[in-house]
Image (cartoon, coloured by chain):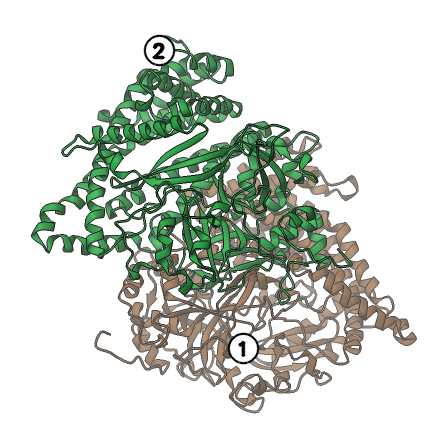
Chain colours: A brown, B green
């Protein structure tokens, strides 16, 4: 990895009392963690070395997940769920790779993964002063937000114009305080190498999602290709395997209970440096509303799917996505209640407040910060009923979502590039528009109409001072249920919004041309636009307020704690460490940290999602566990559990042992640990990986991928019965 | 306990390899168990002493459950679920004791439990030869069954006529081999003393039923009263507390993980000495049919209850009872599959079969036994579809059940007393008829009609050679769904079968008078009778076959094992021993054997069945765990888990420590242990008790029942804050 500037956060130091296992640490900080005292058996510069090659160079971002290079020839190990759409697209009616699994016996058989890209972090540097130079004291909050957004876009466009083929991103490390510019290379020729059947890769399905004990073989292999000269290139038969600067060594001997492990990856978002008023708003307002609405939609979709298999197929991806969030938020709500997190956060904040008021200078500077932040959330709460409905209206029913996106895009694309919402900037427009068109394929009138009906009825019942005029325009003062039915029966009968040609045509038009369109949903989207725009402006204003206020809050918190703390996750590269460790989720229940093949067999019912392949069942009957079975266990380890600090985005992250060898592929957290996003705890924060021994055993014994094991340098210890 | 004859099963000896923890041991055998080597710290004759007073004299049967005398004044400790109906009946609209709990502050406040009786075992003796004297070689199987039934009834009636006020029962210890006569005293004046609110006594409800970890405070106290001269008497204000020959000492210090425990009680039925063909029939035929039909009924009842609260109230007891069996059978089906029990049983039987064929004499005597038993189950399987429907028709819909019972009673009561089915014998008739009339109160037309409709439709679809003529008579050849609706809309409109007066009147009539009755359901019951009678005759014939065959089977099994084995449970007094012990129900999940008050609080949601009383929550917040909290735990133990061998009927059984002191009240098994009925396993056979420390803590801290603790001789260690 090349570095433009290698030291980040130079202001920060981490006092020892913060050195618990909590923390998704930026690379610049891991030298301070004294990892050898935690059991690390290699020098820390083997993990991260700003002046040379390190383990960090062995990982990449692949379609939002993390991937590991596990051979010199660009072989990538990641999760099955990260490879899902690639496997699906590679499948044909003759060869259903999702159901049967896929193996390329030779490189020539590797299948192009069309929409998959591999992102490699080239470099990063602190750009806080460049970003914050546009902020003026006493600036209007909305203007502040817009100025920061514009400045970061300018930095990005400037870098990209000077580095053709690279992509740039500015990440906010601490709200309103520090910003880091990342420069990435994208490899665009990615090919599918091996995937187990979904009866292994998705074993347990939604039932086991967010759950332990886990028996999912959630792994797949890709390979990245580049032009013969080593430069990134579009797919071509003449491309050659990419040679990563570093690849990771897999450790077929695996791990044991208590072993030290660490993870490198790109955790998405956490919210630990927020006030109690934020947590209270999340807990009482935002999450319950989301859970209720997602639950309602899931119920509708499942009911529709029961009577109509075609509808079931169309709504399946949405049900999966909604269910994932639904179960996650339910876990968070239960977790916040059980751990009494709100009360604890309030107590901590009381101590911070006492600290502020204990000294006149601090009182003058920070005395109103907590209250001012609280008032922003109070405002959000009072606006929530209406704003939530506006958001749901423009996102949940496909008919409105598509029409609204088209009209908003036309509005935004009138503006200079750097002033547009990110999705509508030139650099992102191709992806935004092609995704919109692709989404039309899952349009399902019955479900869509029931969702929109419900939202119109709910919106009609808002108090008079919160009216959404676009809703009242279509209901024409009628009794909401009846009026909604009348309008929608007609509208869905006559609309062309599900028609790809029609939408493509709209995408080429100017806002005033779209506004003249007669399509009922386009008209409704146009009517909704002013209200949504006003809402987004209010959001930007609140964001500007919070940006300024949290910057003050972090200053005084740093002063109070007498040191610094790790920034919230923001999809940038982080390290987290811990141990293989069980936990007690409930009174009298202890979860052991390693599951086994016998557990897969135990869960097998013969019906999805517990329908293990007969070949696996047979190997278990024959006790054919070698060569990756620990001698004492007489079984194949399948899942491992550990107390590192992860969140969404850590999917596919390599789990390393103390020697920096790959022992697992991270793919989930336990249900109790969904509240990781607000606070880590040694009691319940546990993450889940598929054990490398299961990866190797499945690939070898069920997949017949011996050549891949050889490529990874794994000895398969041939025995007579192998 | 007085003994007419104290040594039972004198033929039997128990080889040491059978001395695992498996076994519900008859009292006569416990001397052979070497319990001191298992940790027992008292001489075995303190538990059972045919020549004197022992712990066995401290227990009783109370309404089908086991109870423990815990004071010299007849105070009885049993389960809350065993006291449920008594608490319900004692409640008034002003004083809802189920919701609020009940405490008699003085003996004068103790409330009569009208339908509760306490049964004390006076004596027992082997009557095998008396019973089997009526069996002739080569006897017709049906005649054999009837002869044995008649003989046992004669023995019972003879004993009861010579011992006024006592009840006699003959229990079959081994099918077709050994029979024991038990003589019981019944105490009829039973009063409710203390019950916790159902939010403690039923905490966890159906959700936690058959489950661990458990947090149910499933206990209540009764007191037995007798006439001033000490003789059993009906309720009277002049009665005095009963003085049991022995009462049990409670041990407020409780138990710890690994401690030896034993249980005395009246386990109901087990089926371990049956063939693989029996288990196969149960697994493939009988249990799935029951699960399907019970599940269907529960769904109907719950759907009806959702829209109609009055219906919900009426069907609640049936839903509870159906759910209990439903969940139990599901547990059995899963357990048999997971433990591979059928294959194991077949392997064992293969070895037995090899043993039989290895010697000409054995081959001649036993060579066909296994096949002959198998043929009986094959016959049952081929008759199952029709017979199951006949059974469901006469049991599930109240309309038919009541009409059929009335008509069958009239038929049976034409016969001499000893030839009648047991329910219709003079000694049982009062109870049978009053229960029938009582059951009319929960008649709920909507649910009843949907159940009967479904059964008629199913019956109409039986193959032609299995027709139930009574069904075709009412459907009149119409399309089943439509014809059933037509018939039942009329029938439920005009019937008087839900009318108590009408049924009372029918109960007084002769069969031919009933047969002339115009009521549609009475007519249908009369029409069903010949088919049901033929089915019952077939059952008796099969029972006779099995009776003879299992007698042979047990002989050769004894020979094969080179010893004897413990008889199946049959509601007679047994001892079982084991240890406080956790278990691993699934891969990577370990259940610890003691739950705590913190677990109660953790499960609390504020909604049934997890709605703990605020007073309990407050005591937990104040950490007011004394005086029954172990110093190390800083919590109140609530539930305990142990690997003794129990089954239904062990509800309320005392759990003793190694010194013979009461440490818990048994009330359930774990879900995996529902297959205990077919086979015990050290891996999954675990039973559940409420910890005596929770009993005492709740009674003292929430119930204010200090006087009861004093009566039990428990020091409450008064402290300033108590």
| Disc 1 packing (10 Å; few <14; some 14–19; many ≥20) | many
- The secondary structure type at the circle numbered 2 is helix
Q: Position of residue B133 (x, y in %)?
A: 22, 34
Image quadrant assignment for residue B588: bottom left
Q: Is residue A524 above or below residue A221?
A: above
Mark 1 highlights which residue? A264
Q: Is residue A361 above or below residue B340?
A: below
Q: Position of residue B574 (x, y in %)?
A: 40, 48
Q: Is residue A514 visible?
A: no
- The secondary structure type at the circle numbered 1 is strand
Q: Which mark is residue A80?
A: none
Q: Position of residue B309 (x, y in %)?
A: 59, 30
Residue at x 76% of width, y 40% of height: A463
Q: Position of residue A127 (x, y in %)?
A: 70, 80
Quadrant of the rendering where the N terminus of chain B is positioned: top left
Kindly identify which chain the residue marked by label 1 belongs to: A
Quadrant of the rendering where the C terminus of chain B is positioned: bottom right
Image quadrant assignment for residue B2: top left
* Comparing labels 2 and 1, the label whose residue is closer to the camera: 2
Residue at x 12% of width, y 47% of height: B367
Check chain identity for marks 2 and 1: say if they share one: no
Image quadrant assignment for residue B294: top left
Kindly identify which chain the residue marked by label 2 belongs to: B
Tag 2 and tag 1, C-beta contact below 8 Å:
no
Instruction: Please give left or right for residue B377 compared with residue B712 in the image.
Output: left
Distance (Cα) linking label 2 and label 1 = 83 Å
In front here: B311 or A487? B311
Mark 2 highlights which residue? B515
């Amino acid at each position: 990895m090349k570095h433009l500037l290698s030291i980040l956060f130079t202001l920060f130091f981490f006092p020892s009392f913060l050195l618990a296992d909590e923390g998704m640490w930026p690379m610049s900080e891991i030298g301070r963690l004294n990892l050898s005292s935690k059991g690390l058996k290699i020098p820390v510069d083997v993990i991260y070395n700003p002046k040379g090659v390190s383990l960090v160079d062995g990982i990449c971002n692949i379609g939002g997940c993390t991937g590991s290079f596990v051979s010199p020839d660009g072989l990538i190990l990641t999760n099955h769920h990260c490879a899902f759409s690639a496997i699906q697209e590679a499948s044909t009616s003759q060869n259903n790779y999702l159901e049967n699994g896929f193996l390329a016996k030779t490189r020539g058989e590797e299948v192009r993964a069309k929409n998959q890209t591999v992102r490699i972090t080239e470099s990063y540097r602190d750009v806080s002063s460049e970003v914050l130079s546009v902020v003026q004291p006493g600036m209007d909050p909305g203007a502040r937000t817009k100025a920061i957004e514009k400045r970061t876009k300018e930095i990005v466009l400037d870098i990209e114009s000077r580095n053709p083929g690279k992509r740039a991103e500015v990440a906010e490390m601490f709200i309103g305080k520090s910003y880091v510019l990342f420069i990435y290379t994208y490899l665009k020729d990615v090919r599918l190498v091996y995937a187990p059947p979904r009866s292994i890769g998705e074993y347990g399905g939604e039932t086991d999602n967010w759950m332990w004990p886990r028996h999912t073989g959630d792994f797949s292999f890709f390979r990245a290709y580049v032009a013969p000269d080593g430069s990134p290139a579009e797919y071509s038969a003449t491309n050659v395997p990419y040679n990563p600067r570093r690849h990771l060594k897999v450790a077929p001997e695996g791990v044991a209970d208590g072993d030290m492990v660490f993870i490198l990856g790109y955790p998405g978002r956490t919210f630990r440096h927020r006030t109690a008023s934020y947590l209270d708003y999340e807990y009482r307002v935002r999450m319950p509303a989301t859970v209720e609405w997602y639950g309602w939609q899931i119920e509708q979709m499942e009911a529709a799917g029961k009577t109509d298999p075609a509808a079931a197929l169309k709504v399946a991806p949405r049900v999966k996505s909604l269910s994932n969030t639904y179960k996650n938020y339910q876990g968070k709500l239960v977790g916040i209640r059980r751990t009494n997190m709100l009360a604890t956060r309030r107590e901590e904040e009381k101590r911070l407040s006492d600290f502020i008021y204990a000294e006149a200078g601090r009182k003058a500077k920070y005395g109103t910060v907590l209250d001012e932040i609280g008032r922003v959330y109070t405002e959000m709460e009072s606006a929530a009923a209406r704003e939530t409905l506006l958001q749901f209206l423009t996102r949940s029913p496909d008919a409105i979502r598509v029409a609204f996106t088209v009209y908003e895009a036309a509005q935004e694309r009138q503006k200079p590039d750097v002033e547009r919402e990110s999705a509508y900037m030139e650099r992102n427009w191709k992806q935004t528009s092609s995704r919109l068109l692709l989404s039309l394929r899952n349009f399902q009138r019955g479900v869509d109409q029931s969702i929109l009906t419900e939202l119109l009825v709910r919106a009609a019942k808002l108090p008079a001072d919160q009216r959404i005029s676009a809703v009242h325009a279509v209901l024409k003062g009628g009794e909401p249920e009846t009026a909604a039915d009348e309008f929608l029966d007609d509208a869905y009968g006559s609309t062309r919004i599900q028609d790809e040609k029609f939408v493509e045509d709209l995408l080429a038009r100017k806002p005033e041309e779209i506004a003249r369109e007669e399509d009922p949903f386009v008209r409704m989207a146009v009517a909704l636009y002013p209200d949504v725009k006003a809402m987004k402006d209010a959001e930007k204003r609140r964001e500007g307020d919070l940006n300024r206020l949290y910057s003050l809050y972090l200053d005084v918190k740093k002063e109070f704690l007498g040191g610094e703390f790790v920034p919230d996750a923001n999809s940038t590269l982080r390290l987290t460490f811990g141990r293989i460790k069980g936990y007690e989720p409930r009174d009298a229940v202890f979860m052991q940290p390693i599951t086994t093949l016998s557990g897969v067999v135990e869960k097998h019912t013969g019906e999805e999602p517990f329908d293990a392949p007969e070949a696996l069942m047979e190997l278990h009957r024959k006790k054919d566990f070698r060569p990756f079975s620990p001698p004492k266990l007489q079984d194949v380890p399948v899942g491992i559990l550990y107390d590192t600090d992860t969140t969404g985005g850590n999917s596919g992250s390599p789990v390393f042992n103390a020697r920096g060898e790959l022992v697992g592929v991270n793919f989930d957290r336990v249900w109790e640990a969904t509240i990781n996003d607000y606070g880590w705890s040694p009691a319940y924060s546990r993450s889940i990986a598929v054990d490398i021994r299961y990866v190797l055993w499945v690939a070898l014994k069920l997949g017949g991928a011996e050549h891949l094991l050889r490529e990874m340098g794994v000895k398969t210890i041939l025995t007579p019965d192998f």
